[in-house]
Image (cartoon, rainbow, N blue to C red):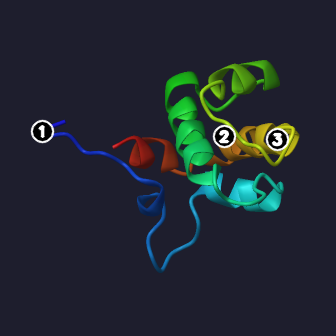
Amino acid sequence: LDGEHVGAFEGLAAPDGPLHPMQEAFRENHGLQCGYCTPGMIMTAVDMVRRKGNDLDDRTIREQLEGNICRCTGYHNIVKAIAAGARAMRGSGATSKAAE
């Protein structure tokens, strides 16, 4: 990865600014439980929006989350949060910023 930028969960939002739209969607939609999987879920979700666009259906979200494991939930609220976050990222500039 020499010369490449690697994004991290902590860099999605400015330290003193509002949450990234996907982070806010997880908060609003109860998409987190213990928090262990949350950074991976949110980073996967942001990348998913970058690759698949803002209009994500439940099947696409669930398929794209195959590599992420959450032992606390049945994924229902995580899927709901990702769909809401994807919609919120539309026009916010968050899609391109997070992907850089």
Locate the N terminus and report the quarter of the image it occupies. Answer: top left
Instruction: Name the front one of labels 2 and 1.
Output: 1
Badge 1: few (under 14), some or many (20 or more) residues near its Cα, within 10 Å?
few
Disc number placed over residue 89 in the picture, else none: none
> Marks 3 and 2: CB-CB under 8 Å?
no
Looking at the image, residue 70 sits to the left or right of residue 97; the answer is right
- Among the two numbered marks 3 and 2 on one chain, the one whose residue lies closer to the N terminus: 3
In this picture, residue 31 sits left or right of residue 39: right
Q: How far apart are marks 3 and 1 (CA)?
A: 36 Å
Residue 90 in sight here: no
Residue 17, compared with residue 93, is above or below; it is below
Instruction: Tell me the SS state at disc 1.
Output: loop
Which of 92/27 is in front?
Answer: 27
Q: Is mark 2 on a helix, strand or loop?
A: helix
The mark closer to the camera, 3 or 2, is 3
Q: What residue type is labelled 3?
A: Lys
Give the residue number, with chain letter if any, for mark 1.
2
Q: Earlier in the sequence, mark 2 or mark 1?
A: 1
Residue 51 pos. (x, y %): 50, 25
The x, y position of residue 33, in whole percent, is 78, 58
Q: Residues within 10 Å of mark 2 (few under 14, many from 20)?
A: many
- The residue furthest front is 71
C-alpha span from label 3 to label 2: 10 Å
For disc 2, the marked residue is 86
Q: Is residue 84 visible?
A: yes
When the figure is inspected, residue 46 is found, relative to residue 23, above or below; the finding is: above
Q: Earlier in the sequence, mark 3 or mark 1?
A: 1
Instruction: Quarter of the image for the C terminus: give it.
Output: top left
